[in-house]
Image: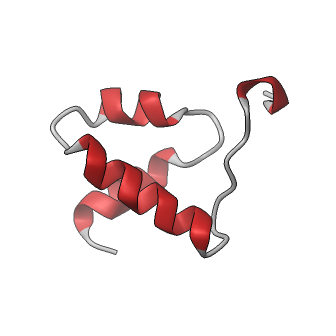
Amino acid sequence: MNQKQSQIWELLDGNHTVGDICQILDSFDAEEIDRFISKCVEIGFVEYLKEEEWDI
């Protein structure tokens, strides 16, 4: 992972939506954030949950 991806990874803790991450990391390109998260989902590192599935 590069430095940007590491910062995104730290926010993939189940407490932030993709929108939250884009707002927090507003200096990042939203498309770059989405690509990285999609790759993490693809390889099984994270799982997308619908908002009603959140148990926080």
Please state the horizontal and vertical placement of residue 48, each as a whole percent of the image: 67, 47
Name the residue at 55% across, 33% down. 16
Residue 55 visible to the viewer: no
> Can residue 5 be seen by looking at this rendering?
yes
- The percent coordinates of residue 45 (x first, y second) are 63, 68
- Identify the residue at image location x=72%, y=26%: 51
Q: Is residue 29 left or right of residue 47?
A: left
Find residue 35 and report its horizontal and vertical position in percent: 37, 59
Looking at the image, residue 21 lies above or below residue 46: above
Count every numbered label the image shows and give the total. Answer: 0
In the displayed structure, would residue 46 be above or below residue 49? below
Give coordinates of residue 7: x percent, y percent: 34, 53
Please determine whether, in this image, residue 47 is positioned above or below residue 13: below
From this viewpoint, which residue is outermost toward the left? 27
Residue at 64% x, 59% y is 46
Q: Quadrant of residue 56?
A: top right
Q: Is residue 4 left or right of residue 10?
A: left
Q: Would you say 28 lies left or right of 51 here?
A: left
Looking at this view, is 8 or 51 the one in front? Answer: 51
Display colour scheme: secondary structure
Residue 1: name its quadrant: bottom left
**Is residue 56 toward the left or the right of residue 28 in the image?**
right
